[in-house]
């Protein structure tokens, strides 16, 4: 609505200006034609005078000649002849423009008559001397012509002088009018410019007020604490959120420098930040405690930007007390949790250690009665064998065999529990030497004929030699043991380097392991076969795994049922 | 010539019985004295208390010492007797229930002369006697 009113006003101003401009233009053009007319009149008056002068010059030249008869006196006459013709032509052109053709024709007749008289007398003087010419002169014919010319020219001059006066007066009037119109037009222009400027300004003011109102609304609504801080460190303006957060009203907030509200410990850091702002540098995330009206401390996080010269700084702050409290709570919970986890871990560690010690003691103490069982059964067979009937003897032998099985079970358990319990010291160990000793041991047990192929050299690893021997021994003895009934065992031992580690492979062509069993064969007491089919304690592979883990290595198996197994141990390489 | 006495320090009756059987089977006829804990071993070796009478309880020429004993462990007994001038060179054979490497190592450190793994078998006993040069132990084959 305002816009269209605006536009109408603006267009009206334009139209008025255009009309004034047109009037001025019209006026100026008529002034110009008046000026031209006046100019022409002036020219006519001037040319009439000059024309008369030229005629007079011609007459003067004639008189001189008539009196002296000398040709040099004819010079003015001759010059005037051309000048007079020229003047008449120019005068004629002006008169014709003003429609005075009659005057022109009259003047022409009179001039011809005068020039004729002059020409004739000069001719007569030349042929007949002065006396011949004198009668013509005395006839007053020339004087008459001259008088007629003079009269006619005087009339003309009078007439044109009048015209000149009239047109000059008209031009003066028109010039005044033009000035007036110009004045009005410029006044009009000034007025419309002023009006437009005024309107523009009013709109700008309104717009600015609108923006300010919007800004104020945001200022009022803000949950964050917004403030303008003066050079004296006081809050010049603070958003209502200050009062909501701290409980101080705006007046009491503005009454004291901001530092007065801060925790004494936080004042120096704040001053430091303030110095940076004063140096023209924005600061972000300054945190300090502000005292609320109720005396409690609120954590406030700040960002401030310098705002010279209107104020010292613009500041945006946020109450982070609750966030800090939650963080504190989370930290406390975390540390509590950590402490509890540690406590539990400690308890578990104790329990595990206790269990290990228990296993060790049990295994150890179990051996004493076992030794007795085995020893006395053997003694029975050895000392009283002949006295026993075959049945009794076979029973005694079974007691010995059972005791031996239990012995190896306990030995394995002891080995396993020692692996968990003790620190295992490692050093460079030659796999070839380990294999050599193992083969020797097998020969000692009467199993030297077993088909074991070692693809040496196997290399060096970092390990504990006792544990490593036990692990390799277990793998080889498994490879020899798990073959189809009656089939010969074929074992290949080889090694490969893998990224700084050495992997020892023990491969057999035995019964193999189904894929779904492969995951659990490394667990303690995990057995896939009855003790009568394949005797064993079920701890051998558990020892292999535990040993590999304790020495920073790993182990695994690749196998398919009926297609043999390939067990591997990977340990850190050495050299 | 009176054969030197062998002192067996063993708390387990079964093990003691089996050791004695091994001695018998190996044909060793030396008198064998048997005590069942560390304190008794120390008392016997020192000739104190009930063992003051050296006729009934003669000074031994060999000690078979179990490591795990009530009251005073075999290590303590070993340490004690190695610290006394009259028993400093007495041959001591440690009886061990396992191939416990650390136990055996420690026993040697304290001055044990040899060790036997239980149950003590006849041939192991002979090997031990041979190793230690105990000619007087008179194993049956040497007696002939």
Image (cartoon, grey):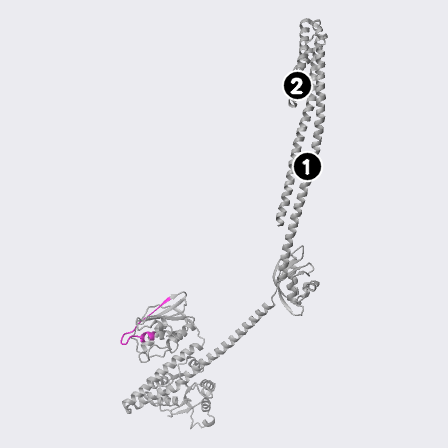
The residue pinned by badge 2 equals A102
Dot 1 falls on a residue whose secondary structure is: helix
Decide if residue A371 is in sight here.
Answer: yes
Give percent across and percent down for residue A176.
Answer: 71, 33
Q: Nearer the viewer, residue A80 or B84?
A: A80
Q: Quadrant of residue B114?
A: bottom left
In the image, B37 versus A324, the foreground residue is: A324
Q: Is residue A219 above or below residue A96?
A: below
Q: Residues within 10 Å of mark 2 (few under 14, many from 20)?
A: few
The label shown at residue A182 is: 1
Rounded to the nearest whole Å, what is the CA distance between mark 2 and mark 1?
Answer: 42 Å
- In percent of width and height, residue A159 lies at 71, 22
As rendered, which of B126 and A573 lies closer to the eye? A573
Q: Quadrant of residue A426?
A: bottom left
Tell me which segment is drawn in magenta: A476-496
Which of pointers 2 and 1 lies earlier in the amino acid sequence? 2
Residue at image location 63% in from the left, 41% down from the top:
A14
Q: Nearer the viewer, residue A188 or A363?
A: A188
Chain letter for mark 1: A
Q: Chain of mark 2?
A: A
């Amino acid at each position: 609505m305002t816009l269209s009113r605006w536009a109408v006003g603006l267009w009206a101003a334009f139209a008025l200006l255009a009309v004034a401009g047109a009037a001025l233009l019209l006026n100026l053009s008529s002034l110009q034609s008046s000026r031209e007319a006046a100019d022409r009149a002036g020219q006519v008056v001037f040319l009439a005078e000059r024309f008369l002068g030229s005629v007079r010059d011609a007459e003067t030249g004639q008189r001189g000649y008539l009196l002296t008869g000398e040709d040099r006196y004819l010079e003015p006459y001759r010059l005037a002849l051309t000048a007079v013709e020229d003047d008449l032509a120019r005068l004629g052109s002006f008169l014709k423009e003003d429609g005075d053709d009659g005057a022109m024709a009259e003047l022409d007749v009179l001039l011809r008559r005068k020039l004729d008289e002059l020409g004739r007398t000069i001719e007569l003087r030349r042929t007949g001397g002065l006396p011949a010419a004198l009668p013509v002169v005395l006839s007053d014919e020339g004087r008459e012509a001259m008088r007629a010319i003079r009269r006619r020219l005087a009339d003309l001059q009078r007439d044109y002088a009048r015209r000149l006066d009239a047109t000059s007066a008209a031009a003066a009037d028109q010039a005044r009018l033009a000035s007036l119109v110009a004045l009005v037009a410029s006044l009009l222009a000034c007025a419309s410019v002023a009006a437009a400027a005024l309107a523009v300004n009013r709109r700008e003011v309104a717009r600015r007020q609108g923006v300010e109102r919007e800004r104020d609304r945001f200022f009022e609504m803000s949950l964050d604490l917004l403030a303008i801080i003066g050079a004296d460190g006081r809050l010049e303006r603070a958003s209502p959120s200050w009062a909501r957060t701290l409980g101080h009203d705006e007046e009491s907030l503005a009454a004291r420098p901001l530092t007065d509200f801060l925790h004494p410990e936080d004042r120096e850091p704040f001053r430091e930040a303030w110095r940076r702002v004063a140096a023209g540098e924005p600061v972000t995330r300054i945190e300090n405690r502000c005292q609320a009206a109720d005396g409690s401390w609120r954590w406030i996080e700040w960002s401030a930007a310098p705002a010279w010269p209107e104020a010292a700084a613009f500041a945006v702050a946020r109450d982070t007390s609750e966030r800090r409290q939650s963080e504190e709570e989370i930290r406390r919970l975390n540390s509590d949790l950590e402490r509890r986890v540690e406590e539990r871990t400690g308890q578990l560690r104790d329990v595990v250690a206790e269990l290990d010690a228990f296993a060790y003691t049990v295994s150890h103490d179990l051996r004493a009665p076992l030794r007795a069982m085995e020893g006395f059964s053997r003694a029975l067979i050895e000392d009283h064998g002949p006295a026993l009937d075959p049945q009794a003897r076979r029973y005694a032998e079974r007691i010995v065999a059972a005791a031996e099985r239990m012995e190896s079970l306990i030995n394995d358990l002891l080995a396993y529990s020692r692996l968990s319990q003790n620190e295992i010291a490692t050093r460079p160990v030659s796999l070839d030497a380990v294999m050599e000793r193992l083969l020797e041991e097998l020969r000692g047990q009467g199993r030297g004929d077993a088909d074991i192929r070692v693809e040496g050299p196997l290399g060096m690893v970092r390990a504990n030699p006792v544990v490593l021997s036990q692990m390799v021994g277990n793998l080889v003895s498994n490879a020899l043991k798990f073959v189809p009934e009656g089939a010969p065992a074929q074992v290949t031992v080889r090694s490969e380097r893998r990224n700084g580690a050495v992997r020892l492979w023990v491969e057999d062509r035995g019964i193999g392991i189904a894929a779904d069993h492969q995951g659990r064969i490394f667990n303690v007491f995990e057995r896939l076969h009855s003790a009568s089919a394949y005797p064993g304690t079920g701890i051998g592979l558990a020892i292999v795994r535990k040993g590999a883990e304790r020495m920073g290595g790993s182990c695994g198996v690749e196998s398919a049922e009926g297609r043999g197994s390939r067990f591997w141990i990977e340990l850190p390489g050495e050299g | 010539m009176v054969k030197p006495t062998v002192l067996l320090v063993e708390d387990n009756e079964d093990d003691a019985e089996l050791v004695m059987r091994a001695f018998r089977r190996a044909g060793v006829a030396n008198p064998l004295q048997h005590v069942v804990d560390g304190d008794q071993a120390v008392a016997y070796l020192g000739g104190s208390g009930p063992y003051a009478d050296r006729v009934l309880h003669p000074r031994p020429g060999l000690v078979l010492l179990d490591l795990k004993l009530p009251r005073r462990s075999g290590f303590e007994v070993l340490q004690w007797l190695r610290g006394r001038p009259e028993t400093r060179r007495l041959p001591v054979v440690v009886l061990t229930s396992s191939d416990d490497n650390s136990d055996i190592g420690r026993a040697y450190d304290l001055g044990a002369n040899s060790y036997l793994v239980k149950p003590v078998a006849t041939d192991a006993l002979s090997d031990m006697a041979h190793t230690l040069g105990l000619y007087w132990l008179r194993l049956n084959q040497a007696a002939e």
